[in-house]
Amino acid sequence: MTPGPRSRRAQTRRRPGAMPLSRAAGACATVLALGAMPSAIPAAHAQSAAVQAAADTATHDFQVPAGPLGAALPVFAAAAGVSVSADPAVLGERRTRGLQGRHTTADGLRLLLDGTGLQALALGPGGYVLRAASAQAGSETAAAQSLPALTARAAADPAATEGTGSYTTRRMNTAARLPMSVRETPQSVSVLTRSQIEDQNLTTLDDAVRNVTGLTMQKGYYAGESGSFSARGFAVSNLLIDGLPTSAGANGTFNADNDSLDIYDRVEVVRGATGLTTGAGTPSAAINLVRKRPTEEFQGSVSLSLGRWNNVRSVADVGGPLNEAGTLRGRAVVSAQDSERFYDTAHDRNHLFYAIVEADLTPATVATLGLYHRKVDNDGFIPGQPTAADGSFLPGLDRSSNYANDFDYWHQTDNTAFAELEHRFAGGWQARLAATWKRPEQDMVYSNLSRIDGVLHQDTQHYRLDNRQDSYDASLQGPFELWGRRHELVLGASYRRYDNRNWGGWADYAWSADGPVVDPYDWDASAVAEPDIDMSLWRYSYTTRQKALYAATRLQLADPLKLVLGARLSAYEFRNHGNGTGYEVDDEFTPYAGLVYEIDARHSAYASWTEIFEPQSSRDRDGQLLDPITGRNYELGVKGEYLDGRLNASLAVFLIEQRNRATDDLDGPNPCPGSSWGYCKRASGEVESKGVEMELSGALTPAWQLTAGYTYAAAKYTQDSNAANIGRLYDSDLPRHQFKLSTRYRLPGELSRWRVGAKVYAQNSVVSSDDSRIRQGGWAVWGLSAGYQASPALDLQLNVDNVFDRRYYETLGWATGGNVFGSPRAATLTARYFF
């Protein structure tokens, strides 16, 4: 039997658990024959016994995850530099416990097959065939020749992390839309892999941001189910999904970005200014969520988690070919969660469905279509605790305290459709068309507090949001020859539209002494009747559009020297539909430059200069629109790549200059012409952020994975109309020092079914940016985990967060709210079954 017509992409699609090959000796492993070619068998069998013995006894470091045997074999073959053949009917749905540590090829293959009912038969140097252990020994050649000639190639997508067991990736393209390894990228980058997500029991984007070097997550400062994200002293304004940028946050008051991680293979992060890939925004970071893709072979899993506060969560994930030829592939993920929270008056119900289909339209053309539906149905809101009138924390306040009412809720529905069309030309060139259509909706009722004459009163509000985001991108990418060297180029165009429509109102007694009186130590969630709220009291509706042309190239100037250049030409439009006002920014040029020098085979040094722009609506005394805020990121760093790319290290220093910030024009008229109050503005404000970042991620040994990162970032005012601000922290409630670590270790020998893990987050003391009297000392939170591979099909894992039950505020706010407790100690037990 011979394989049917397949696209180039399908032929090289990553098999679950596969890892990329990195040396010529692994070439034979790139044809991992799940059925060997008969004509190749006699030649292999004719090799000398001595050469075969050398192949058998060569030792290698293996890191093969447990799971389907068909998925594990490419990983083993790639690490050993051999080929393994098997009849697909013999493989069936067999599973393996995996393989960790240093072994000879022969011993490793024997251990990998332990419990599967299969054994390996040597066919010659670098060649093995699998057969049932109970099968009668016959002619080796005859046994091999009976196999169908069906071949499958090992991993071709070096960026995918699912099934690799790794805490790093070999490639990413978030920085400049060019596929580059971590060491080749002239910016600080991180990746949160699928293994980290599962090992640390991370379920939401909030969880992901908590665990990525250099990112800060603040929960509850804004109303909403999501936290707000920051990096290098500035708010993160863009989220990318498969490389297509979308706007973060519903608006400046409500956040709704806390996506589920169930549908993502990894989270890629580039810190600093990222205008080349994101368009308008802040010089903080780009967070790229990379979706799971269909698999060439059938695979599936179901999991069930039980945790504290009646937290019950289940996930089903199934993928594989949808036709016999394998030219149509699909994947579906379904999850449901029902839980309470550590605070009172809260009950969450979350559901999602994700489906994606890939079709090989021609051998060189692949079309992708996907749908995503997520529904959040939460009772209660994240409680923002008040302080005493003097800004001190209320003594003895229980972390479960919540001043919500029984009728408070957060309802959210996210509907997303996406499509891609990819065509590969001769010579390595590739064209890609991609689109994402998002339709999120939120409906919320919540209650804040206000202090009047020393007494806390409740303010109840009701809002609805109906938003839409459309993002399109077309690109052409490939290599070219110049000056006798090979270089890379990407050209593209993008379009984004964001429509934001919000409306709502508040109770008649809001922000007055007529509001219900609240005792923080004794609150009854049923004490207040739901008020009638006029939903026409507040409306806000606007549209933003962004259009851009972009280009980037990586030039091989010399054997050790590469230059990455890029540019983006953008047009930005804002329209306020409420008052008919708006503004436009045309021909905004955003440059990108990075120089990478390869010190030796493992180390590189780099320097980069990146920019981003942020339009602003303020006008000067002549009525002219102020120039956009510009964010420039200057960075120097050293990176290391070890163990054939399985371990990455980086050290970087950076300087960010954010200029043209609107400040009051104190020399101009007051009020400004055309307004009823306030000064006109000048584009003269500046903020500088300086810092250091260090990260180590990947395999310290074949059995030990680790990611550890330290960040120092201090953003301060350097120019402002208020002289008192100069030299002060731009956002004092963001930590200047952060340390994050997550690790997993598989025990050796007879205990190899067991694995243990840990994580820690630590930061320095902070001061509220709203009230300098509200302060908190530094704190650290630890987590522990343990896993047991009960059988090839069943995996058990226990995660304990905040092991020492540290009491701390995750976010600081103001005197009447926004101060959010971190979660107390909690344990979660997860059972995952593979089929």
Image (cartoon, grey):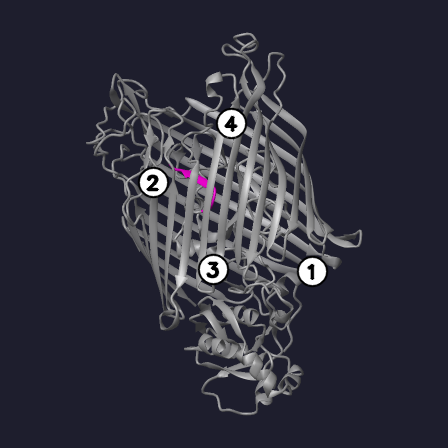
Q: Which mark is residue 779?
A: 2
The first of marks 2 and 1 along the sequence is: 1
The vertical placement of 308 against 273, above or below, is: below
Measuring from the top left, give residue 764's x and y in whole percent: 38, 37
The first of marks 1 and 3 along the sequence is: 1
Question: Is residue 146 something one can see in this rendering?
Answer: no
Q: Residue furthest right?
A: 483
Q: Which mark is residue 541?
A: 4
The first of marks 4 and 3 along the sequence is: 4
The residue shown at (47%, 81%) is 118
Q: Residue 364 carries which label?
A: 1
Whether residues under marks 2 and 1 lie with C-beta atoms below 8 angstroms apart, the answer is no
Separation (CA) of disc 4 from disc 3: 52 Å
The first of marks 1 and 4 along the sequence is: 1
Q: Residue 700 carries which label?
A: 3
Q: Which of 131 and 734 is in front in this view?
A: 734
Magenta residues, as a range?
A: 212-219
Tell us which disc is closer to us: 1 or 3: 3
Q: What secondary structure is marked by label 4?
A: strand
Separation (CA) of disc 3 from disc 2: 27 Å
Q: How crowded is mark 4: few (under 14 residues within 10 Å), some or many (20 or more)?
A: some
Separation (CA) of disc 1 from disc 4: 44 Å
The residue shown at (42%, 36%) is 735
